[in-house]
Amino acid sequence: PMALSRVWIEDGCILCNVCVEISPESFVIEDDNCFVRSEADLEEHEEAIRQAVIDCPVAVIRVEED
C-alpha cells in the first residue's frame, strides 16, 4: 500500500469522537471542530488513521497517498 502523505477532515464532521478514540495521536476535537494533529506521525499511525477513515460515520476523513 502507498504511504499517507496528507490527512484532513472535510466539512460535515459530527464530532462523534470515533477518530479520536481510534487514534488520539492523530486526531483531536477542540472548540467544536475536529482536526488532524499537525504533529501527527502519519507513518507511525497509518493503520489507526486508515481504520478511522473506515469507521467515520459521515465519511469526512480524507487521505492523500504517495
Image (cartoon, rainbow, N blue to C red):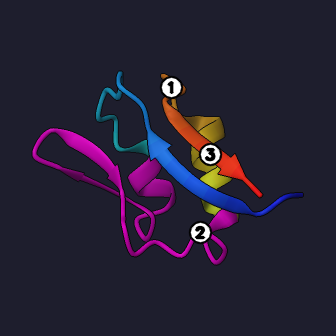
Mark 1 belongs to which amino acid? Pro
Label ID, residue 63: 3
- Lateral position of residue 6 relative to residue 23, left or right: right
**Which of the two discs, 1 and 3, sits closer to the camera?**
3
Mark 3 belongs to which amino acid? Val
In the picture, which quadrant includes the N terminus? bottom right
Earlier along the polypeptide chain: callout 1 or callout 3?
1
Quarter of the rendering containing residue 10: top left
Q: Is residue 23 magenta?
A: yes
Label ID, residue 57: 1
- Lateral position of residue 12 relative to residue 47, left or right: left
- Residue 62 at what x, y percent from top left? 57, 39
The magenta-colored residue range is: 19-46
- Residue 24 at what x, y percent from top left? 40, 65
Which residue does the image show at 49% across and 62% down from the upper left?
23
- Would you name the residue on which mark 2 appears? 42
Task: For the residues labelled 1 and 3, say whether their Cβ atoms are less than 8 Å apart.
Answer: no
